Amino acid sequence: MSKNVVLEALDANNWLKICDLSVSDEQKAFFPISNVYWIGISRYEEGGTKLFAIKADDEYIGLIGGGHDEDGITGYINPVMIDHRYQKNGYAKPAITLMIDSLCNSLGVSKINVNHRKENVIAGKIYESLGFFVYSETENEYQRKMDLTQTLLYRQVHYNELERIREIDASTFIGRAWREVNGGRQLVEINYQNTGFPHGYERHLAELRETITNGGSVLGAFDNEKLIGFCSVNADIFGKKHKYALLHQMFIDLKHRRQGIGKQLFLRSIIEAKKFGAEKIYICAGSSEETIAFYRALGCVEAEEINQELYESDTRDMQLEYSFT
């Protein structure tokens, strides 16, 4: 499907066509407001939302808008609506990207806020892929922010830099974790506070040194030269049916989580694994609810082949894989 998406300022020539567009009946639970309402608000609310019709290949397919938030500095995007007949064609992401460009160029904003219902998982994934991170939440909604002033550097971490993992606060609170219960996996409350690296700084440092010594890669995320996250990929290939490379470690600094940094490191780990001749990445994923949700959101599934040595190192871990062939 073509992604020839453009935004057209809402005017007398197109507003009726936009009024005819709607989400599905099921989606009205988290998108209950009609396009007619948004058009009315934009007309009569002082300093209100600037609305645009979304067009794809000369067809009107949706509505999007934005403006200055209450502080008069930050931008916002709302609404974002694709008619039910045109969904699942990849139109929302380019439309949002064009709206971001419009806010930056017309209003000069460097930060943009969006809200979406928690049950609107697809919207969350789209926003996260564009760099919007969750900074707050209510009972029903996530508030996300894009900070265009924040630039991160991703690069290889060299052997003589590995001690810098001390800069990372690896602590985490695990409320629920996956455990074997009556022959199946279930989420169980454990309420455990991990105060640092789970196996201790020295062991994690030694394993990173071993990874590089044996030809593997350690990738880091840096914010103004401060290490805020890293992952490591071993060069050794294993597996009988498939060629696996091990994603050995992945840690993000406590204050920098849920900002898409882990995803970016994971995507870069795929490039490294391909260099080593792998077909899949193998992950011994910690059993916490958040960790497993993170990997599953990336497309990881239970491993077809279980590496017995890795499994026995901690039988609570989930053995996952990600295929890129």
Image: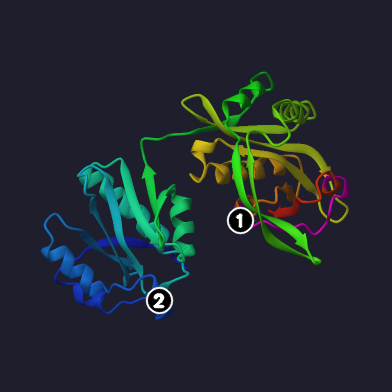
Tell me, for residue 293, which label it has, or none. 1
* Nearer the observer, 23 or 280: 23
- 294 in the magenta segment: yes
Whole-percent x, y for residue 90 in the image? 46, 64
* Left or right placement of residue 206 versus residue 140 in this view: right
Residue where numbered disc 2 is placed: 84
In space, the residues marked 2 and 1 are separated at their CA atoms by 28 Å
Q: SS at mark 1?
A: helix
- 304 in the magenta segment: yes
Occupied quadrant, residue 37: bottom left
Colouring convention used in this rendered image of the protein: rainbow
Q: SS at mark 2?
A: helix
Q: Is residue 49 above or below residue 312?
A: below
Which residue does the image show at 42% across and 58% down from the upper left? 93
Q: Is residue 233 above or below residue 49?
A: above
Residue flagged by tag 2: what amino acid is it? His
Instruction: Mark 2: give few (<14), some (14-19) or many (20+) Cα within 10 Å.
Output: some
Which part of the image, by quadrant, shows the C terminus? bottom right
* Left or right placement of residue 120 versus residue 229 in this view: left
Which residue does the image show at 31% across and 48% down from the upper left? 101
Which residue does the image show at 37% across and 41% down from the upper left? 147
